[in-house]
Image (cartoon, rainbow, N blue to C red):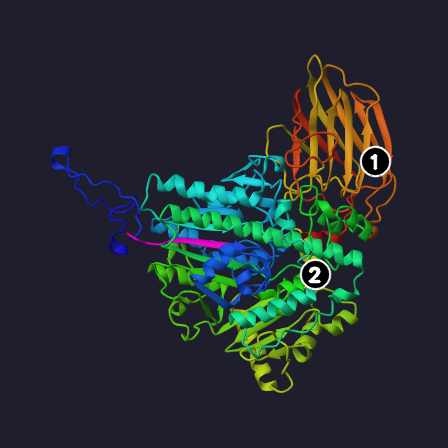
């Protein structure tokens, strides 16, 4: 059946039957559903998070990934795939086949500005693959991480037009933001929040849940329409921090990283040569100046760092296991051979753990890092429900072997990623390496090429822009086929690069001279800066011969460098890259029209969805009160009235043992707790918590405002303490929730969800006074969550 005959009559088109005055002189014609071409393949895209080039087993890593390795052994491994260096921008490219600035995704949406390439909202003229395939009879499923819309749109107030179901997906199960706990995730099912179906104590883990849901979505439709193909976009939280995994998976790597990141890098590079992933005469990039030599660390620091890598490796192997479950399901249902599978990571390995790593990223966000001794005291908890951990950046550097640098930068360590293709029914080649240059904008054109589908001219009445990528399907069975993607620009926070015909020019921002001048990452670029960068700081690499950017040949090939710089500006003008913006702090602090106007009073009600941090009342470092209107039944009541955060940090206002309580969890390192001196009486009452700052915050050392915390029952003071410091910057993860504490408990004084058992009519948060913020710390938080 040709594509033109898939739907001979659909609503809105002319009626092909006959309509007379009565039915005996009329001919009916039923509206026909859109049907895919018989035998059309399923499409499965697996997008890993922060997984570096040298971290999969099939890319030379010692980490065990047998199921992904099997896809490579029975399919194709691409050694020259490129991304954007950052999460949301890359994911927008994978979804649309257009460059990230043309998608409005210059960076993560939290850093949007009012320029076309930077506004954080993918235009509807850049249709997603889901919107394209649903027009051709596919079921479409989005599972896992989304992070493709402004965070202030994530609440129940919407708007919903950029949620997954608003962009062509039939079903969605996952999380909307940049990261989430794997033990207590912030889950959304279709268009509403849900709680995980089990607890960690009952064996719950997000990756397993996502795999289960993916299989159930497919099975739901296949039992009704077995011949209808599906498109599944499967995006586990792995291997983004927090690196959460059952302990036995981490213990399976016990002692295997004790020789450190230098040795890991050497072993992986040797293996990459053996596998043909890099040329036999290739050189590995030199030691990164930010990474200390393994032997320079103290024995305790090495022990801690090795354990963090064991946990990461276990996390990746655990993820591979559940990907294997999904593969086995496809085999059992007979769908495996005719499923086009593409596996990619969104950027290079992540360095947000810093030089030492952390057991709780919230400490990093709040400028309150733990000491080595404090980290070692929790070494056996790393990866478990009580931590929010990330490894040191020495492992990041090793994970991007053989390349230099990492995520957020446009050297190859940030933009070169693993990529696998598997489709037994459509590809004859098995277990081969493909070295053609490719970029993730090529994935959508390749899928359409394979399916014989032309890019749509309109989607839901919106005229579509041209695709920017090109198909690489011609390389499937021809290892010598030339690449059709000859030129690709990159830009991330002013860090720029361009690939063209085997040459690569890179202009880092800030460069060494700028760093010496006190211009760190995230500093705005002035016109004078840009002139200096263009004149003196571009580097040139002949990557056709020097894959790891080890030899800067800018001086020897000055004319080639000038040609490459000029070409970068041509591409920048074409794809909305201008104006170049190296800032991060300024972008984050910019007022945006979609953000709710400042309010000093919020009323929340029980049995409603949690408020994401972007839309919740901001109570840090300012006077505020929390007033609950309750009815206490005979015999008393207990439970949470209002809370925000998780066991990594947060606060909770609650009733327990007939007493009123407030607990402030300072990044899992201290707990400030005030309790009423008398019981809460039966009947209807107002229960109130008040905080009055008694000093200024010292955010530079991780201390929020000290203050007086007071509890009231019907305006009568019943409890009071002085809090020497509070949380300075953020409670993240965990939203603000009324009437319960879903997820992990903010305090060990109760067991989550600790729902309030009386009648809770509402809780009002009232704020006054000046709001004190630390923009650099908030910027670091948003960047780490991407």
- The disc label shown at residue 128, or none: none
Residue indicated by mark 1: 692
CB under 8 Å between callouts 1 and 2? no
Query: Of circles 1 and 2, which is in front?
Result: 2
Does the magenta segment cover residue 397? no
Residue at 53% x, 78% y is: 544
Q: Earlier in the sequence, mark 1 or mark 2?
A: 2
Q: Toward which corner of the image does residue 779 lie, by quadrant? A: bottom right
Report the quarter where the N terminus lies. Answer: bottom left
Measured in 3D between alpha carbons, the distance from the residue under mark 1 to the one under mark 2, in whole angstroms, is: 40 Å
The answer to whether residue 715 is left or right of residue 463 is right
Q: Mark 2 highlights which residue?
A: 393
> Is 198 located above or below residue 684 in the figure?
below
The C terminus, quarter of image? bottom right
The residue segment tinted magenta is 38-46
Viewer-nearest residue: 151 or 83? 83
Specify the quadrant of the image occupied by residue 645.
Answer: top right
Q: Which of 133 and 617 lies nearest the eye of the viewer?
A: 133
- Crowd band around label 1 with a 10 angstrom C-alpha radius: few (<14), some (14–19), many (20+): some
Residue 436 in view in this figure: yes
Q: Residue 579: give x, y in percent of width and height.
A: 61, 66
Pick the residue in front: 487 or 118: 487
Above or below, comparing residue 679 to residue 40 in the picture: above
The reply, left or right, for residue 160 in relation to residue 766 is left
């Amino acid at each position: 059946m040709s594509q033109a005959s898939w739907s001979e009559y659909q609503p809105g088109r002319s009626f092909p039957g006959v309509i007379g005055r009565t039915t005996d002189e009329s001919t009916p014609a039923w509206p026909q559903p859109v049907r895919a071409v018989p035998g059309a393949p399923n499409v499965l895209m697996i997008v890993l998070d922060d997984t570096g080039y040298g971290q999969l087993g099939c890319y030379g890593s010692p980490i065990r990934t047998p199921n992904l390795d099997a896809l490579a052994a029975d399919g194709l491994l691409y050694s020259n795939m490129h991304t954007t260096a950052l999460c949301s921008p890359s994911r927008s490219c994978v979804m649309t086949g257009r460059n990230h600035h043309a998608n409005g995704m210059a960076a993560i949406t939290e850093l949007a500005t009012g320029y076309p390439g930077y506004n954080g909202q993918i235009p509807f003229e850049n249709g997603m693959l889901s919107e394209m395939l649903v027009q051709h009879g596919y079921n479409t499923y989005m599972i896992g991480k989304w992070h493709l819309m402004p965070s202030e749109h994530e609440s129940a107030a919407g708007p919903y037009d950029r949620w997954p179901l608003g962009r062509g997906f039939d079903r969605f199960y996952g999380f909307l933001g940049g990261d989430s706990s794997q033990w207590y995730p912030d889950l959304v099912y279709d268009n509403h929040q849900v709680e995980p179906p089990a607890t960690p104590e009952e064996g719950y883990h997000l990756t397993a849940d996502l795999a289960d849901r993916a299989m159930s979505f497919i099975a739901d439709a296949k039992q009704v329409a077995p011949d209808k193909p599906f498109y599944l976009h499967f995006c586990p939280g792995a291997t983004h921090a927090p690196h959460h995994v059952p302990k036995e998976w981490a213990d399976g790597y016990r002692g295997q990283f004790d020789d450190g990141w230098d040795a890991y890098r050497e072993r992986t590079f040797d293996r990459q040569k053996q596998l043909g992933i890099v040329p036999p005469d290739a050189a590995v990039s030199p030691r990164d100046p930010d990474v200390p030599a393994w032997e320079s660390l103290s024995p305790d620091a090495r022990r801690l760092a090795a354990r963090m890598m064991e946990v990461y490796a276990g996390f990746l192997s655990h993820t591979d296991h559940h990907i294997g479950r999904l593969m086995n399901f496809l085999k059992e249902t007979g769908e495996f051979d005719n499923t086009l599978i593409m596996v990619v990571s969104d950027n290079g390995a992540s360095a947000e753990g810093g030089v030492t790593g952390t057991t709780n990223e919230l400490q990093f966000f709040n400028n309150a890092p733990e000491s080595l001794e404090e980290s070692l005291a929790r070494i056996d908890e790393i990866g478990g429900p009580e931590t929010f951990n990330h490894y040191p950046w020495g492992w990041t550097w090793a994970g991007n072997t053989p390349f230099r640098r990492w995520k957020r930068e446009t050297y190859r360590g940030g933009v070169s990623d693993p990529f696998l293709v598997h489709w037994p029914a459509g590809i004859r080649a098995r277990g081969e390496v493909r070295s053609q240059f490719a970029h993730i904008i090529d994935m959508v054109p390749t899928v359409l090429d394979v399916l014989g589908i032309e890019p749509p001219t309109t989607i839901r009445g919106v005229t579509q822009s041209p695709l920017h990528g090109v198909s690489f399907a011609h390389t499937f069975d021809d290892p010598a086929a030339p690449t059709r993607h000859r030129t690709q620009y990159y830009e991330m926070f002013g860090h720029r690069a361009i690939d063209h015909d085997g040459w690569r020019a890179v202009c880092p921002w800030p460069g060494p001279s700028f760093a010496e001048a006190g211009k760190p990452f995230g500093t705005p670029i002035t016109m004078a800066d840009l002139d200096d960068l263009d004149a003196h700081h571009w580097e040139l690499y002949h990557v056709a011969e020097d894959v790891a950017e080890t030899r800067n040949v800018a001086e020897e090939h000055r004319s080639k460098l000038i040609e490459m710089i000029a070409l970068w500006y041509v591409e920048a003008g074409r794809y909305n890259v201008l104006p170049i913006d190296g800032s991060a702090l300024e972008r984050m602090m910019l007022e945006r029209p979609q953000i709710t106007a400042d309010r000093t009073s919020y009323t929340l009600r029980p049995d409603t969805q949690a408020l994401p941090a972007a839309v919740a009342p901001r109570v840090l470092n300012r006077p505020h009160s929390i007033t609950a209107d309750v009815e206490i039944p005979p015999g008393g009541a207990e439970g949470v009235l209002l809370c925000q955060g998780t066991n990594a940090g947060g606060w909770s206002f609650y009733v327990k043992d007939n007493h009123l309580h407030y607990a402030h969890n300072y990044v899992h390192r201290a707990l400030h707790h005030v309790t009423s001196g008398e019981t809460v009486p039966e009947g209807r009452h107002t229960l109130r918590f008040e905080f009055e700052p008694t000093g200024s915050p010292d955010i530079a050392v991780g201390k929020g405002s000290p203050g007086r915390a007071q509890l009231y029952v019907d305006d009568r003071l019943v409890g009071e303490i002085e809090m020497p410091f509070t949380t300075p910057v953020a409670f993240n993860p965990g939203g603000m929730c009324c009437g319960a504490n879903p997820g992990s408990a903010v305090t060990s004084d109760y067991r989550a969800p600790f729902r309030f058992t009386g009648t809770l009519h509402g809780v009002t948060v009232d704020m006054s006074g000046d709001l004190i913020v630390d923009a650099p710390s908030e910027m670091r938080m948003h960047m780490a969550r991407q």
